[in-house]
Amino acid sequence: MATRDALPTLPMTAPIGLKGPRGDIIMELKWAERLTARELASRLNLSLNAIRHHLRELAADGYVRHERVARGVGAPAHGYRLSPAGEALFPRRYEDALTHVLEQVVAREGRQVAVAMLQGQFEELAQRLRAELAGASPGERLRAVAAALSGLGYMAEAGVAGEEGSLVEHNCALRAIAERFPELCAAEQRFLAEVLEADVERAAHVLAGACACAYRLRFPGAVPGMVSPGPAGGRAGSELPKESV
């Protein structure tokens, strides 16, 4: 894929109760698939000893875990990622209560009614965005979609260059619901294809063990080599995450 300019996303802050360096580490691990202590030190401009101290504390609290990863030449290093407890620090949009309501709908009205309710959120969002984005460029559409999803708690980032683009959602705001109703994920993919006017391929899926949900995008008819501009300060697009094996 061509080099991409970052498209802006809504700011996300560290989870409540984890401020300062510990909160910064948690946020970096949420944005990335795995990071070594040295990579975290470089990103956060802290000493390696300080990073290791905070990682030990976070591991003792059960928020991070590590595994050996290869980083070029030399011995493998410890790569850190969030544990399930660390993932649970991020917003879930009252999913427990909503899951209970949906289960009641399934019991009384049938699964199809519950699925239609879930699909409705994407249909309503698509209707609004289509009206706002009539005649917009691929980059403008992708920028608006990433901002809308971030506003719902998905921590979305995106990039586009010519006919190709990507969208990564670093937080599954409705994970428990998606586990019970995977039709929600299919509805999201249809929403993206409709609003972005793009071919949408799922590249990674949280429910399949990835650290984020990611999509590869192709915009038919876009001018090859044209990079969509974005304001400075947007978060740099990351490589698409891989499924866990």
Image (cartoon, grey):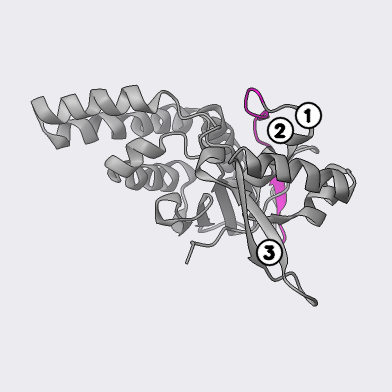
Residue 66 shows in this picture: yes
Instruction: Kindly report which numbered mark, 3 or 2, lies closer to the viewer in this rendering.
Output: 2
* Residue tagged 2: 23
On the image, the x and y values in percent for residue 102 come to 23, 28
| Magenta-span inclusion, residue 5 | yes
On the image, the x and y values in percent for residue 146 come to 57, 38
Question: Which residue is at the front of the view, 155 or 224?
Answer: 155
* Residue tagged 3: 2
Q: Quadrant of residue 104?
A: top left
SS at mark 3 in the image: loop
Identify which amino acid the numbered label 2 is placed on: Gly
Label 2 close to label 1 by CB (< 8 Å): yes
Label 2 to label 1: alpha-carbon separation: 5 Å
Question: Which residue is at the front of the view, 5 or 10?
Answer: 10
SS at mark 1 in the image: helix
Residue density around tag 3, few if under 14, some if 14–19, many if 20 or more, within 10 Å: some
Identify which amino acid the numbered label 3 is placed on: Ala
Judged left or right of residue 108, residue 190 is right
Identify which amino acid the numbered label 1 is placed on: Gly
* Residue tagged 1: 20
> Of marks 3 and 2, which one's residue comes earlier in the chain?
3
Question: Which residue is at the front of the view, 219 or 21?
Answer: 21
Question: Furthest-front residue in view?
Answer: 60
Tell me which segment is drawn in magenta. Answer: 1-17
Label 1 close to label 3 by CB (< 8 Å): no
Query: In the rendered image of this protein, does residue 60 appear above or below residue 32?
Result: above
> Of marks 1 and 3, which one's residue comes earlier in the chain?
3
Query: In the rendered image of this protein, does residue 171 appear above or below residue 101?
Result: below
Residue shown at the point (78%, 53%) measured from the top left = 37
Number of numbered discs present? 3
Label 3 close to label 2 by CB (< 8 Å): no
